[in-house]
Image: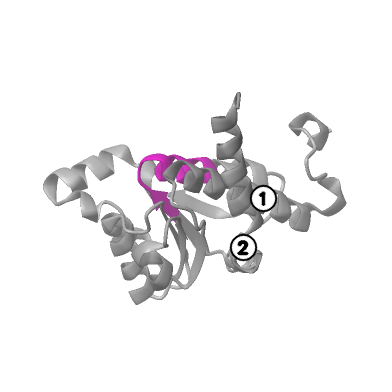
């Protein structure tokens, strides 16, 4: 069938989205809102495509969600510090690039969000373990069978699919859904879900 490969991909993506655990996503929204109220920081990080997602999400919090609020979200993407990561990986090991940053910044009751498609990225595993041991709330974004971080973290957002590209798609879609839900909660009727940027700022 013409275009069958594309239709198959989109169907598999749709099936995963349909079967997501929405309760866990709602729990994450509550956690993020509480963290904002307390003035604590949210740390987010990943490798490769997951790192790009972490950077993207940080920008969404900085501009999209926090824009116009008196009390804003404190969100920091650990994989955006390129020179710091290179120094750590060169002098120590690549596995230490996130944990070494958390040793500097992390405070009790902060939130640490690790993104790993496989759930087994060693640097993400180490960072989540460190955060748990030091009084932070931990969140795992994972795919496949969930890997190590699914059971380690306080809260797991799991895309149950044996496909890295669909896992990464699902993660950014979840974050975008969270963005719109949180903007609605914080900005009420002044924010129209699905409206264009120009419509929102009029």
Task: Give the x, y percent position of residue 25.
Answer: 61, 62
Residue projecting furthest to the right: 189
Q: From the image, tell me which residue sits under label 2.
A: 25
Task: Give the x, y percent position of residue 155.
Answer: 50, 69
**Is 120 above or below relative to 63?**
below
SS at mark 2?
helix
Q: Is residue 66 visible?
A: no
Q: Is residue 38 visible?
A: yes
How many numbered circles does the render carry?
2
Task: Give the x, y percent position of residue 49.
Answer: 41, 40
Q: From the image, tell me which residue sits under label 1.
A: 177
| Residue visible at 53% across and 49% down in the picture | 171
Helix, strand or loop: magenta stretch: helix
| Residue visible at 44% across and 39% down in the picture | 52
| Residue visible at 61% across and 60% down in the picture | 20
Quarter of the picture containing the N terminus is top right
Residue 35 placement: quadrant: bottom right
Do residues under tags 1 and 2 come within 8 Å of each other at their CB atoms? yes
Magenta includes 54?
A: yes
Quarter of the picture containing the C terminus is top right
Magenta includes 48?
A: yes
| Residue visible at 83% across and 44% down in the picture | 192
Residue projecting furthest to the front: 1
Q: Nearer the viewer, residue 193 or 197?
A: 193
**Is 73 above or below relative to 148?**
above
Q: CA distance from mark 1 to mark 2?
A: 9 Å
SS at mark 1?
helix
Q: Is 186 placed left or right of 43 in the picture?
A: right
Residue 121 placement: quadrant: bottom left
Q: Is 117 placed left or right of 32 in the picture?
A: left
């Amino acid at each position: 069938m013409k275009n069958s490969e594309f239709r198959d991909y989109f169907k598999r993506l749709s099936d995963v989205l349909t079967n997501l655990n929405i309760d866990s996503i709602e729990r994450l929204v509550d956690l993020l809102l509480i963290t904002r109220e307390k003035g604590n920081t949210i740390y987010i990080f990943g490798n490769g495509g997951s790192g790009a997602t972490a950077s993207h999400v940080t920008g969404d919090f900085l501009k999209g969600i926090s824009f116009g609020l008196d009390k804003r979200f404190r969100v920091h993407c650990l994989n955006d510090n390129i020179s710091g990561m290179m120094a750590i990986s060169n002098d120590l090991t690549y596995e230490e690039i996130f944990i070494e940053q958390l040793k500097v910044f992390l405070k009790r009751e902060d939130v640490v969000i690790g993104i790993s498609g496989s759930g087994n990225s060693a640097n993400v595993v180490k960072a989540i373990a460190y955060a748990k041991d030091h009084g932070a709330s931990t969140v795992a974004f994972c795919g496949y069978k969930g890997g190590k971080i699914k059971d380690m973290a306080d809260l797991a957002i799991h895309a149950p699919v044996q496909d890295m590209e669909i896992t990464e798609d699902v993660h950014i879609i979840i974050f975008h859904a969270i963005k719109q839900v949180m903007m609605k909660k914080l900005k009420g009727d002044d924010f129209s879900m699905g409206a264009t940027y120009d419509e929102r700022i009029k």
